[in-house]
Image (cartoon, helix red, strand yellow):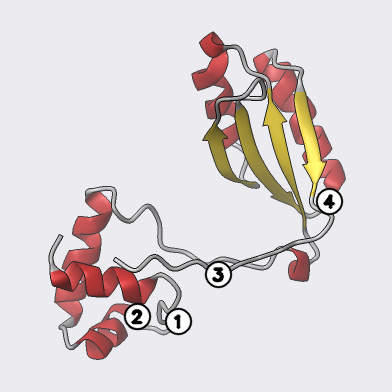
Amino acid sequence: MNETDRKILNEIQSDFPISSQPYHDLGRRLNLTEDEVIEAVARLKNEGIIRRIGGNFNSARLNFVSTLCAAKVPEDKIDMFVEVVNDYPGVTHNYLRKNPYNIWFTFIAEKMAHIDDALKEIAEKTGVTEILNMPAEKMFKIKVDFEV
């Protein structure tokens, strides 16, 4: 990774331009051409350094609910369970942990009933019945940028 890559990564973490030509705008801010920014971002995405570019929304302000889920998944079912869970559009994070509840994921939806229904479906599809649903009572959101 070169210095240009680092500058681009530092800039886009929390200040990606919302415009008709975001890569042009980034280039102007970083003294690069639009093509240089596009090529660097594409390369960083192909290399797996950039996972995604997209908005982060305050789900509570949009009247959505969120929950943290934890499941006890037998080792031989982990890959299948994760694949099923990740098919749900409201799942935003999914982690393997060293814990009896070894798969943890977050789920956001318009109504808790939607999440409850989805968790029942996941249990039926996977045979994993021990899934905890731990809704957020209060959100403590922090902004995190990683200096590259």
Residue where numbered disc 4 is placed = 111
Q: Residue at x 54, y 19 (%)?
A: 78
Residue 114 sits in which quadrant?
top right
Q: Of the two numbered discs 4 and 2 on the same chain, state the one appearing first in sequence.
A: 2
- Separation (CA) of disc 3 from disc 1: 19 Å
Q: Residue at x 22, y 49 (%)?
A: 47
Q: Residues within 10 Å of mark 1 (few under 14, many from 20)?
A: few
- Separation (CA) of disc 1 from disc 4: 29 Å
Say if 67 sits above or below 147 in the image: above
Residue where numbered disc 1 is placed = 18
Q: Judging from the image, what secondary structure is the residue with disc 2 in? A: helix
Which residue occupies the foreground of this view, 76 or 139? 139
Q: Amino acid at mark 4?
A: Lys
- Separation (CA) of disc 2 from disc 3: 22 Å
- Separation (CA) of disc 2 from disc 1: 6 Å
Which residue occupies the foreground of this view, 139 or 54? 139
Say if 18 sits above or below 45 in the image: below
Q: Amino acid at mark 3?
A: Lys
Q: Residue at x 33, y 83 (%)?
A: 21
Residue where numbered disc 3 is placed = 143
Q: Could you tell me which quadrant the N terminus lies in?
A: bottom left
Q: Nearer the observer, disc 2 or disc 3?
A: 3
- Residue occupying the far top of the picture: 76
Q: Residues within 10 Å of mark 2 (few under 14, many from 20)?
A: some
Which residue occupies the foreground of this view, 60 or 71? 71
* Residue 124: % across, % down: 74, 18
Residue where numbered disc 2 is placed = 22
Q: Residue at x 63, y 17 (%)?
A: 73
Q: Nearer the observer, disc 3 or disc 4?
A: 3
Are the residues tagged 2 and 1 within 8 Å (C-beta)?
yes
Horizontal side of 61 relative to 41 (left or right) equals right
* Residue 130: % across, % down: 76, 20
